Structure formats: C-alpha cells, structure tokens
Amino acid sequence: MGGLDLWFREIHKDDIALGVRVKDVLWRGKSAFQTLDVIDTEMFGRVLLLDGLFMTTERDEFIYHEMIAHVPLSSHPEPRRVLVIGGGDGGTVREVLRHPTVERVDLVEIDRLVVDKSREFLPTIACGLDDPRVSIHYEDGIRWVRDRAGAYDAILVDSTDPVGPAVGLFAAEFYADCHRALRDGGVLSAQTESPFFDREEVASIYANLRQAFPAARPYTASVPTYPGGYWCFAWASKGPDPAPEQVRERYARLGGGLKYYNPEIHAAAFVLPNYFLDLLGAA
Amino acid sequence: MGGLDLWFREIHKDDIALGVRVKDVLWRGKSAFQTLDVIDTEMFGRVLLLDGLFMTTERDEFIYHEMIAHVPLSSHPEPRRVLVIGGGDGGTVREVLRHPTVERVDLVEIDRLVVDKSREFLPTIACGLDDPRVSIHYEDGIRWVRDRAGAYDAILVDSTDPVGPAVGLFAAEFYADCHRALRDGGVLSAQTESPFFDREEVASIYANLRQAFPAARPYTASVPTYPGGYWCFAWASKGPDPAPEQVRERYARLGGGLKYYNPEIHAAAFVLPNYFLDLLGAA
C-alpha cells in the first residue's frame, strides 16, 4: 500500500459506519441545498456523496436504479409519460429509457449541481440525461406534482433520506398529489429506507402512503452501499398487479443488458421476512 | 455523547469497512485456532468476533441462523439426525431444535473457546446447546465426516470464511464426504460468502460443491453485519426439491416465533439477480 491511507465513512444512526478506502477526492462543493462530493475508490469506482452520505457508486448503482425503475414500469401495460423526482445523477432516467413505450420523461431535480457534477464525473450514470425524450426541470418535486392531474403513467420518487428538504417527499399530502397526477392504471415507486435500521421511518412512510394508495407495499433489493445492505422501495398503483407472464413479456422487450432485475426478481422482491411484515402490521 | 468514542471496524478485501460504536469490551482472548473477542454495542447488542471479524450479534443473528437451518430442514420430510459443523455459538443448533422430528444433533466445533464464551456472554444464542438431544464434539469437522457414511439426514456447515483452518470446509473432498455421510434424501446447507464482494470464492465454492451435488444451488439472505449485507448459502440435496405445500406444512409445525424465515422467503431466497446468475454460469 504505502502513501496516504485515506478513508471515507458514512455514519448511520450515530452507531454504525460504512467505510471505503479513497484513492482520490475529485470534487468538493456545496449548493443551496446540500454538500456534494465526488470521491474515487478502488472498491466502488467513483462515488457521489450528498451531505456526506453514499448516494450512488459506479459499481453498485445498477441495483438501485434497475429496481426503482423496472419494477413499476413492468407493472404498467404501456408507460408513455414518466416523472422522476430527484434522481439528478441520471441513473433512474437511463433505466426508464430502456422501455420502448416511453415517449417523455420529466426529471424534476431541485439541485442543478447534482446534474452538472454527475454529467462531469459519472458519465455512465448520467448518460440518459441528453436523450431527446428527457426534459430536466430544476424545481421542487413537491410543488411540481401539485397541479399535474392525470399527467403521468408512472412517478418514480428517487429522493434522498427523509431529513431536511426531502421530508415532504414522504408526506401523505405529497402521495395524494402523486395519486392525482397519475392517469388511470398509473404506478408509483419510491425509495423508502432500510427496514432493519430505519424502523420508525419505514412504518411512518407506509402509513402515509396507504392514505392515498391503500394497496401500496414494499419491495426490496440488496444495495451494498446503503446501511445494512437491505433496502426497500414502495410500489403503489391505480391499476391491478401485473400477471407474471406480463412481467416476462415486458422484460423481454427491454432487450437484455440488465445486471440485477429479472422477472423472477420482480416477484421475489415483494416477499418480506417476518420482522418486516411485523413492522408493517404496526404501521 | 461524551466519554471515550470507541469503535470496532471490520475491513473486507482491504478496501471496505463496517464499523460499530462500542460500549464495552467484554472479553479478549485467543485459542489455538483464532482470536476471540466479545464486545457490547448499542446497535447490535453483544457481538462475537473471530479473528477480528463479525461472527454473530445479538440483534441480527436470527437472520443467519434461521436461514442456515430452516431452508434445509424444511426441504426434508423427516429430519432426525442432524450434523452441525462449526456453529459453536449455538444459534444454528437452537434453530435446528425447533423441528419436532429431530432426535439428535451432533455439533462438531473445532474450538472449545467459542462454545465456552458463547455460553458465558451470549446465552440467548447458546441456549440450545444444553438440550439433551445435542452432543458437542470438539473436533475437526473435516475429519469427522470422513467415516460417517449414511449417518445424517442433514448437514449444516456453519463455518468461518475460507481462510486458515476453514479452507478445507469449502473443498470438493469435503463435499464428497458430506454426500457419503448423508442418508437417502439427505440435505446440506453451508454458508458461502458474499456474491457481490467475494466473486472468485463463490464461483470456486459452487464448482467444488457441484462435483458431489450436481443440483446444488445458492439461496440468499440479507445479513446487516456481513460485507455488503447480502449473503449466500448453499443448498444441496440427495432428494427432490420440496413442494411449496410441504414447506408450508413444515413451517406450521415449527409453532411460530421466527423473525425472518417463512415459506414465501424459502422460495424467494433461491431467486438470484442477473449478476449472481452470471457468476454461477462462469463457475
């Protein structure tokens, strides 16, 4: 080894830390909303940090981005207009664009710096942002959905954690606005934290969500750079659950190249261990 | 906070670290085989460390122990004689004993210190070790299985990582001996590392295992204190796969109280993301 032994670590709930050895610090900065840093690592490639927390890494970003995009979009017969809230790194948009029915994607990201720095430092993630089907709006997603009744087939809430400016993206009012902004049969996904470490937050999120979408439920994925490595996402819909053969057909249309999601994962992701079922029962 | 800010961290592959804030160091020692430490933490309760690595914690041990025990035992119509190799903390034995058909459990642990210190510091994990159906043998599991043809209905390999003395527990010769030690319809499980971080080890383990059990395959669970939080286990059997209704019946016989495993998790745990399927194809 030799030389400077540099580490970044994210501390969660004051008591656990995920650390990664750092090759280089590529950028450090600050917007009106948050701090933004980009580091380079041997283990995860380049890493985007917001307020000192892992947001996305070159090596494991495929898991989160495939799962937040393909589970909802494969639940819809023909998604044409898609709204992504947050997600300024572009990874979710890149996955949405794999669906051949998609005609237009509105990316509503409050912080222009995330988009700019992702384009500069994370081109394999940001690559979808220049597609002609994509419009980027540097606005508050909470305000954006308020007056967009019936505008979308799918809404994907790719937010930071429920602290600071993102709190409103986990509130019952926001979910009610999303419900209104969805057309008939429309579908929503959202990142909803760790069922192991963030028990109270998760219970509260699903209680809020079910006020607008009574059948909303979580699905999960294993993301190594998020606390505990076990992450949940909300699935909520104004339509029926897709049949397994529909999920398979829609997967076939994507044309391959996915590294995590497949039709069997789609179904298995909704299966929860007992402690998570208990947590939702208490919600 | 105030006072001494004490942390333990496990470094994996030189480049990532999982840290936990330490309330107290309860025991530090060393056997002929390894170092053994017990720390107390706010986040995970008491934690057993072997050679400086997380082995088990009071808070998340249920995940690993339920999954290494109930997936194989619910795959067998009537498991009576069970061999646990390693697992000196007792958690796997505790779960095995939930199955009402089990008449005898041989626990073969090479290191007596693990058993002694688990009994002393981790009573909720070690509690099964005093059951009259359990015999503890302080011997090398590799040697133990060599001359035990047709002795067991289930073998559970609850080992440390494939370095040092445990290397032989991942070798083709050992798996062939296990195959011989199983009766007709017998079933085996084994912990087999992280499919995300330990790609080469995992590919090699399954190549070895399939020499003895051609249909061997991995199943997974989310364990927060293991690297990446995503862990795989091998399932291998001399019998057929259980039908879903058999898994449900056997689960009902356990009488409740499980915190992770359920019949739907049994099936979903065998569903793998594309990157893991690719890894096995290359094995």
Image (cartoon, coloured by chain):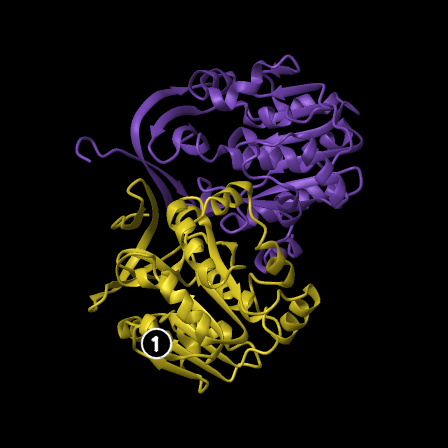
Chain colours: A purple, B yellow
Closer to us: A67 or A113: A67
Q: Which residue is depicted at the point 35% across and 27% down?
A: A40
Q: Residues within 10 Å of mark 1 (few under 14, many from 20)?
A: some
Is residue B247 found left or right of B166 in the rendered image?
right
Closer to us: B157 or A139: B157
Q: Position of residue A252 (x, y in %)?
A: 68, 34
Quick check: B246 above or below B3? below
- Note whether residue A171 is visible: no
Residue B75's quadrant in the figure? bottom right
Count of picture labels: 1
Closer to us: A12 or A70: A70
Q: Position of residue A49 (x, y in %)?
A: 42, 29
Which residue is the extreme one toward the left?
A2
Q: Position of residue B62 (x, y in %)?
A: 48, 63
- Note whether residue B40 is visible: yes
Residue A82's quadrant in the figure? top right
Q: Which residue is depicted at the point 33% across and 80% down?
A: B137
Residue B146's quadrant in the figure? bottom left
Which residue is the extreme one toward the bottom?
B132
Which residue is the extreme one toward the right?
A184
Quick check: B76 above or below A234? below
Closer to us: A61 or B243: B243
Which residue corresponds to mark 1?
A: B144
Q: Position of residue A121 (x, y in %)?
A: 42, 19
Q: What is the chain letter for disc 1?
A: B
Q: Secondary structure at mark 1?
A: helix
Q: Which residue is depicted at the point 25% across and 50% down?
A: B4
Is residue A85 found left or right of B26 in the rendered image?
right
Looking at the rendered structure, the kind of residue marked 1 is Trp
Q: Which residue is depicted at the point 71% across and 40% down?
A: A248
Quick check: B209 above or below B182? above
